[in-house]
Structures are given as structure tokens and as C-alpha cells.
Amino acid sequence: MSLTEFIKHKIVFKMMKPFVLVQFSPPRSGSTLVFNIMRELFSSKKIFKVHTFRSMCQEMPTVVTFRHPLDCIASSIIRYKKDPTQEEIERQIKIFNEQGLRDLVKIKDMDNILMLKYEDYVNDFEYIYDHFEEFFKIKISPKKRQALTEKYNIKSVEKMIEGGGSFAETDKKTQLHGNHISKYKGASDYYEEFFSPEQIKLLKETYPDVLETFGYK
């Protein structure tokens, strides 16, 4: 990028900043839940939901969701109704490497980024609301909190997507898919029963930096 292009790039992002929010995450880390809460709270803004770390993520207020990488990969295999074969695991590693998993370690301390840990918020939406209030300097009323929790808890989402077909079939507004919720219903650490000990060893050796940085044993 030339100096002229760089300056234009910075000017465009500066102009966009008041009107744009970004939701970035590796797949299967609760991003759609958080995206929908953002969409409801910031209806006047354009929200970009992305699975690859882009230049806008360095400039715009960006909410990042992350989850134990082995649960993410297990969930990704399940959504496509695949078995955890060696070939499929290698395919998933490639996908997750391309879609932001390794970027989490690099970006976690950036000032414009809010990191939300799946295991902390999946059964406690108050965690999301409290962090949003602090990060965005807003106030979310108890009434609004209750309404959002009732609308997007796992039972309500299951009803929304009931009969939704395959994962490829997506609601354009909510970005909820058919087969969005697995039989494990958002539980944590189910990778331990989904993968073999040898597969777990391979995956942990693939992502030691992510596991260590975010406290996943």
C-alpha cells in the first residue's frame, strides 16, 4: 500500500467510525448470540460480523468472542454432521487457522477491542451487558436486559430455528442457521468425549499459545 492509499484508508475509517461496529470471532464461539444483542442495542449502527481479522477490526470498536478451541472445532464438525476423522480434523484446523483463531492472541490487548469469553457468558448474559456498558459507555436497563435474555436464551433460539433445515440455511436478519445448536446445547469441554485421546493431544499441540493465553487447561 502506497502512502497516498494508506492516508485515504485512514481517512475513510475515521469517517466510518461513528456509524460502524464489528463483531469478530472464530467460528462456533457464540458470535451469533453476541451479534444479535449488539444488533438490538445499536440499531442505528452498521454491524459487520466477520470470521477473519480485517483492517476494520484495527480501527472500529470490535467485540471479539472466543471459546476453548477444541470445543469450537468439535462444534464445527458436528454442525456439518461429520465424524471426527483425521482428515476432517485436519480440514477444520485449516479452516480455523484461516478464520481467526490464531489472531486472538495478537489482538487481545488492543484498546478498541472487547474480548468476551464464551464460557463466562453462555449461561450468564449479565456478563455481556456489564462488559458492554463499560466498553461502550452506555446504560442497559434491567427491562432491556430481561427482554434480550428472554429472546436469545438457548430455548428461545431453538424455537426460532425449529424446522430451519441445514446449517447452510441462514436467516439474513439474525444470521441464525438451521442446525445452529448442537445436541450438547452450548456446553463446555464436551470435546473430551467427542475426540479420542490421541486427537485431543494433536489439537492441544496445535494451539498451545491459545490454550495458555486464555487459561484453557
Image (spheres, rainbow, N blue to C red):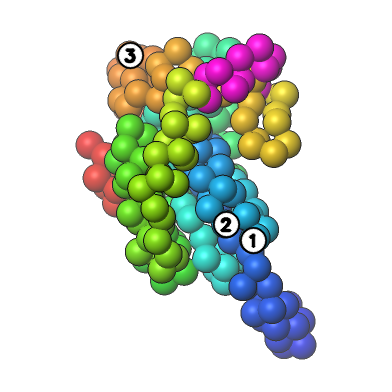
Front label number (1 vs 3): 1
Tag on residue 193?
3
Identify the image quadrant of the N terminus. Answer: bottom right
Q: CA distance from mark 1 to mark 3?
A: 41 Å
Residue 158 lies, with reference to residue 117, above or below; the image says above
Residue visible at 70% across and 29% down in the picture: 170
Name the residue that disc number 1 marks.
45
Residue 164 lies, with reference to residue 188, above or below; the image says above
Check contact, mark 1 vs mark 3: CB within 8 A: no
Front label number (3 vs 2): 2
Residue visible at 70% across and 31% down in the picture: 171
The image position of residue 21, as x and y in percent, is 59, 61
Specify whether 192 is left or right of 108: left
- Asked whether residue 193 is in view, the answer is yes
Give whichever of 2, 64 is nearer the camera: 64
Residue 57 lies, with reference to residue 87, above or below; the image says below
Residue visible at 32% across and 47% down in the picture: 127
What amino acid type is highlighted by mark number 1?
Answer: Lys
User: Could you classify mark 1 by the number of other residues whose Cα lies within 10 Å: few (under 14), some (14-19), or many (20 or more)?
Assistant: some
Identify the image quadrant of the C terminus. Answer: top left
Q: Read off the magenta span.
A: 157-167
Name the residue that disc number 2 marks.
42
* Residue 92 quadrant: top right
Q: CA distance from mark 3 to mark 2?
A: 39 Å
Check contact, mark 2 vs mark 1: CB within 8 A: yes
The image position of residue 95, as x and y in percent, is 59, 37
